Image (cartoon, rainbow, N blue to C red):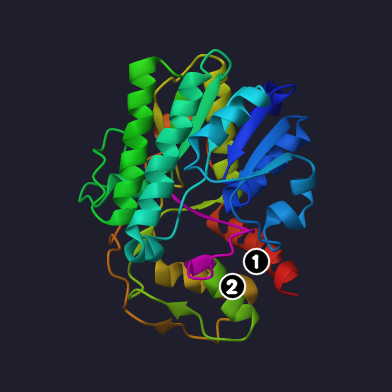
Amino acid sequence: MTDLLAYDGRTVFVTGASGIVGSWLVRSLLSSGTAVVALVRDEDPRSEFVRSGDDRRVVRVRGALEDLVLLERLLVEYEVDVVFHLGAQTQVRHAQRQPWATLEANVRGTYNLLEASRRCARRVQAVVVASSDKAYGESAALPYTEEHPLAGRNIYDASKSAADLLASAYASSYGLPIGIARCANIYGGGDLNWDRIVPGTIRSLLLGEAPIIRSDGTLQRDYLHVDDAVTGYLALGEALMAGHELGEAFNFGNGRPVTVLEIVDEIGKVLGRTDLAPVIKSDAPNEIPAQWLDASKAASRLGWTPGLTLAEGLRRTADWYRAVLA
């Protein structure tokens, strides 16, 4: 598992620092005495990054991934040792409505970051690129292993496939210390996208309203608490700094498929609101029917396993939203 001492005394650059994963990753790094440079496109005062005050404990830079000159300047000026590339447009429905903006952020933003890292290769010891189970696209053979082809078909999934492939290409072409993290559906405190099933359901139930399910409720997903995602990223970064797993991709997930209806039911139990039946819209185009991951490679090679059960993770998540929505 992760040894935060590996990051002590180093400078780490985090893109997407105000997102759900970025917020908690920054907190973990700061707890080890790591110097953090954080790239933030938009600043939301409700984000955990701002609410916690961690935004005032880092070098905070406003900017976009589409700006290669800015990225290279940051890596050089702050003598960055490790890069965690988490910044992306993460909403499937937004990607369908605005494909160009999604491709600019997810594809161009990724190759800009990789190119900046290549130009600073003498200094940068590790680059962890956030991919997703969406990069695999739809497959009848489940769970996904790292050997599955990357075959995203809709705009969002294709953007993740492309970014993933670019990371592999830069690693093999230039010998860069790049690792790729393919995570399951990440949930936890700090997710302010109410269209997502976990935060949307929690908010509805806390307000005494029936939760909304955009799909028919049968979609199966693998859910990973943000704390477990953070330990996965840190474990991969640590391996890269030690010269291991260069150019490799790793799945991070629980390996257990859960339907949307099941997770809504579980949230209802956690909040004690099983009296509010969900409203099922059956309006979720471009969604893959079933996705879950085999994370045995991360267990055997990185020593990583998820630390939280779904029930424990949802309880921890609900506590965060109770405090915020209060």
Furthest residue in direction front, as rendered: 69
Residue 302 higher or lower than 261, as above or below: above
Residue highlighted by disc 2: 202
Whether the magenta-drawn stretch holds residue 194 is answered as yes
Query: Residue at horizontal 50%, vertical 40%?
Result: 67
Based on the displayed image, in which of its 4 quarters is residue 146 positioned? Answer: top left
Whether the magenta-drawn stretch holds residue 169 is answered as no
Taking 200 as reference, is 143 left or right?
left
For the N terminus, the quadrant is: top right
Q: Amino acid at mark 1?
A: Ala
| Crowd rating for badge 2 (residues with CA inside 10 Å; few <14, some 14–19, many 20+) | many
Please state which of residues 309 and 10 is positioned toward the viewer in this rendering.
10
Taking 322 as reference, is 254 left or right?
left
User: x%, y% of residue 180?
Assistant: 43, 33
User: x%, y% of residue 160?
Assistant: 36, 45
Please state which of residues 102 and 167 is positioned toward the viewer in this rendering.
102
Numbered circle sitting on residue 318: 1
Query: Residue at horizontal 44%, vertical 29%?
Result: 114
Q: Please say whether residue 80 is visible from this viewpoint.
A: no
Q: Please say whether residue 217 is visible from this viewpoint.
A: yes
Furthest residue in direction left, as rendered: 140
Check whether the beta carbons of the residues at disc 2 and disc 1 lie within 8 A of each other: yes
User: x%, y% of residue 326?
Assistant: 75, 75
User: x%, y% of residue 260?
Assistant: 41, 68
Q: Amino acid at mark 2?
A: Ile
Numbered circle sitting on residue 26: none
Query: Residue at horizontal 60%, vertical 38%?
Result: 14
Query: Residue at horizontal 49%, vertical 72%?
Result: 264
Please state which of residues 238 and 310 is positioned toward the viewer in this rendering.
238
Q: Give the magenta range.
A: 184-198
